[in-house]
Image: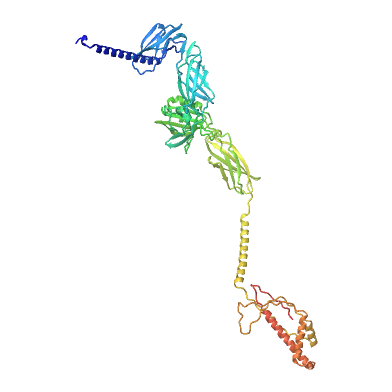
């Protein structure tokens, strides 16, 4: 079918759709080209330093296309098919001394665009590289930054920072001129906090170029300062001539460890050449195990971060002396050692477990090493000699002894010799040992001598004492005597100066005699007390029964009735305080618990005579009339009966008094006058 066969209206419709398609395609291409060209930046062309002969051009473009190519125009020169957003160009094809326009074109499958043009003088334009090899340190609260210098002259630096733990904070900027030497730029940022971590960005530019450009930013993390030394603890295990040392330490603070912390270990034994392990890599853990010999070793632990080093933590591993330390053989240094043997000698000072002067030599030096040791040794100086060998990575001590290049006598006496606790036959002595530096030889023993001072003779007695002793109890001395005591140190060469002290023993006390007298006195005292107490107890349990006192009655015959009557009238009795008890009727026993009778007390005075007269009168009245009483015979009879009655009454009273009993164990003696 020919073209004429199509209907006219169908042909017009087809032309309209074709035109619309072309318009849409051209619109989409224009939109794509515009967006791509907006993302394409104008190029920067420069040299890295003023002495460079190569120029660099850089630009940027944000696109997802992978097959974009660039054409760079520098003046009249065109550089095609560049695949990156930057490229070097040789100076031979460039105009450097006058302004030239520069631009870049980007080509892709769907678009083609051109960047804005820029006019530059290439020789005047310098752009440094971003700061490289940045290091830092804290100077109090000022941050010191260092990086590789681009040129010999100083640069201008722009530094911005913010705290590491506050990423939302805005950057704080500081611009400063660096100082420089031939290889390094230096800049200081003041008034920061050294115990805080920071994020820091640095860029730089030339101060000599006419058209300097800022370099790209360099990012760096600045940790806090390591102000404190590591807190190290040590455990030591003895293993057949070597020691296993396990070190642990606490982690560093978080601000100081934001960029990482590692640790380095060194020991004095390795630094002196006696090492069995060649390399020690930085340690990133908080625990480490190492091996050392039996000699004294200082282990140093240092923490390190990007801002610097911590103060060193020094762990002292003291010398482990043998229990049977002996004197070295004189020919010990003359023998040949193998390559794995290390000799170590250091001066042994008093109370100094860490040596100050160490002499070392290894088997690799052979005779030259031992000869050098001989030249460095001093006379009369005590050295500790160690011979170490490497057992794998473990240094093992195979020999230990005391060495003197040359011995002498001690140059000082034992120090502070004193006496105390003196008795009549003994004294205690105390002193301080001779310092090692003054012994000048191997001290074998002490000699202690005592000399009794008297007018007749001087007797000296000496003893050998071990060098391990610093006190001694001296016995068998004479009471009340005066002694000179001397103490001297002895080496294999001879005796040194002596220390002296004068003592006086006490007088002997007759201790045994006084003890004997005291015991005898104590025996008699106890015997007397026991006797008294036994009698008192016996008197309470078995009280004695009193014996009645009945005096003999001797009738008294007066010469006449008148004398008798007169004597009776004048007679008086003295009665003392008595305890009287009523006698029981005849034939009845008195019970033991009979109640005590009343006590009658009183004195007989003139009223007694009146009572007696009344009794006589009553008797006369009962006997008869008054007429009858006038009869002489009756009078004699009455008087006789009266006397007999009174005698009977006196006997009754005597019997009653004789029957005294005791109250509460007390007996009253009754003394009666004989008529």
Can the viewer see residue 582?
A: yes
Front-most of residues 189 and 485: 189
Residue 648 rendering spot, x and y as whole percentages: 71, 85
- 53 above or below 367? above
Residue 561 rendering spot, x and y as whole percentages: 79, 88
- Classify residue 239 as left or right of residue 640: left
Residue 576 rendering spot, x and y as whole percentages: 72, 76
- 300 above or below 210? below
Can the viewer see residue 459?
A: no
Image quadrant occupied by the C terminus: bottom right
The mark total stands at 0
Asked where in the image residue 388 lies, by quadrant, the reply is top left
- 615 above or below 172? below
Front-most of residues 373 and 87: 87
Front-most of residues 498 and 362: 362
Asked where in the image residue 217 lies, by quadrant, the reply is top left
Asked where in the image residue 409 lies, by quadrant, the reply is top right
Image quadrant occupied by the N terminus: top left
Its colouring scheme is rainbow
Residue 60 rendering spot, x and y as whole percentages: 40, 16
Front-most of residues 513 and 186: 186
**Residue lying furthest left:** 1
- Classify residue 464 as left or right of residue 341: right
């Amino acid at each position: 079918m020919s073209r004429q066969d199509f209907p006219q209206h169908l042909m017009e419709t087809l032309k309209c759709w074709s035109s619309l398609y072309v318009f849409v395609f051209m619109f989409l291409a224009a939109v794509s080209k515009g967006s791509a060209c907006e993302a394409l930046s104008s190029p920067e062309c420069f040299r890295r330093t003023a002495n460079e002969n190569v120029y660099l051009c850089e630009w940027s473009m944000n696109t997802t296309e992978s097959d974009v190519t660039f054409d760079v125009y520098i003046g009249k020169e065109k550089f095609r098919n560049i695949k990156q957003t930057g490229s070097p160009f040789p100076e031979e094809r460039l105009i450097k001394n006058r302004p030239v326009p520069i631009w870049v074109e980007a080509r892709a499958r769907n678009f083609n665009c051109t960047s804005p043009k820029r006019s530059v003088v290439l020789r005047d334009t310098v752009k440094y590289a971003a700061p490289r090899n940045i290091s830092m340190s804290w100077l109090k609260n000022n941050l010191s930054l260092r990086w590789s210098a681009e040129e010999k002259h100083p640069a201008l630096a722009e530094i911005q920072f913010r705290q590491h733990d506050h990423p939302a904070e805005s950057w704080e900027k500081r611009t400063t001129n660096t100082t420089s030497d031939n290889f390094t730029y230096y800049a200081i940022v003041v008034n920061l906090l050294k115990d805080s971590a920071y994020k820091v960005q640095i860029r730089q530019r030339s101060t000599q170029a006419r058209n300097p450009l800022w370099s790209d930013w360099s990012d760096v993390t600045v940790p806090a300062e390591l102000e404190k030394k590591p807190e190290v603890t040590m455990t030591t295990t003895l293993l057949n001539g070597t020691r296993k040392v396990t070190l642990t330490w606490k982690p560093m603070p978080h601000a100081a460890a934001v960029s990482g912390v590692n640790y380095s270990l060194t020991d004095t034994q390795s630094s002196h050449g006696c090492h069995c392990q060649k390399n020690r890599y930085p340690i990133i853990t908080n625990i480490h195990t190492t091996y050392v010999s039996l000699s004294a070793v200082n282990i140093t632990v240092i923490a390190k971060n990007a801002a610097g080093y911590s103060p060193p933590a020094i762990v002292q591993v003291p010398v482990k002396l043998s229990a049977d330390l002996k004197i070295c053989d004189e020919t010990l240094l003359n023998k040949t050692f193998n390559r794995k043997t290390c000799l170590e000698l250091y001066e042994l000072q008093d109370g100094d477990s860490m040596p100050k002067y160490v002499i070392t030599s290894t088997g690799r030096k052979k005779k030259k090493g031992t000869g050098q040791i001989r030249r460095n040794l001093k006379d009369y100086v005590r050295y500790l000699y160690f011979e170490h060998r490497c057992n794998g990575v473990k240094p093992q001590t195979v020999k230990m002894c005391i060495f003197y290049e040359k011995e002498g006598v001690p140059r000082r006496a034992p120090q502070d010799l004193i006496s105390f606790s003196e008795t009549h036959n003994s004294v205690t002595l105390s002193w301080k040992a001779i310092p090692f530096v003054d012994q000048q030889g191997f001290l074998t023993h002490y000699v202690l001598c005592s000399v009794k001072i008297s007018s007749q003779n001087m007797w000296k007695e000496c003893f050998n004492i071990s060098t391990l002793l610093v006190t001694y109890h001296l016995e068998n001395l004479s009471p009340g005597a005066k002694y000179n005591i001397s103490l001297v140190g002895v080496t294999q060469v001879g005796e040194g100066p002596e220390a002296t002290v004068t003592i006086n023993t006490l007088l002997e006390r007759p201790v045994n005699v006084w003890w004997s007298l005291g015991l005898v006195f104590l025996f008699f005292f106890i015997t007397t007390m026991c006797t008294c107490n036994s009698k008192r107890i016996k008197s309470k349990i078995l009280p004695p029964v009193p014996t009645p006192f009945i005096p003999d009655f001797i009738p008294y015959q007066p010469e006449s009735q008148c004398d008798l009557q007169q004597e009776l009238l004048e007679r008086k009795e003295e009665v003392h305080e008595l305890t009287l008890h009523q006698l029981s009727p005849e034939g009845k026993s008195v019970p033991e618990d009979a109640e005590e009778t009343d006590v009658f007390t009183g004195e007989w005075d003139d009223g007694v005579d009146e009572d007696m007269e009344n009794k006589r009168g009553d008797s006369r009245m009962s006997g008869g009339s008054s007429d009858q009483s006038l009869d002489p015979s009756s009078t004699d009879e009455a008087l006789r009966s009266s006397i007999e009655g009174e005698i009977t009454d006196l006997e009754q009273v005597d019997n009653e008094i004789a029957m005294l009993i005791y109250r509460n164990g007390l007996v009253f003696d009754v003394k009666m006058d004989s008529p």
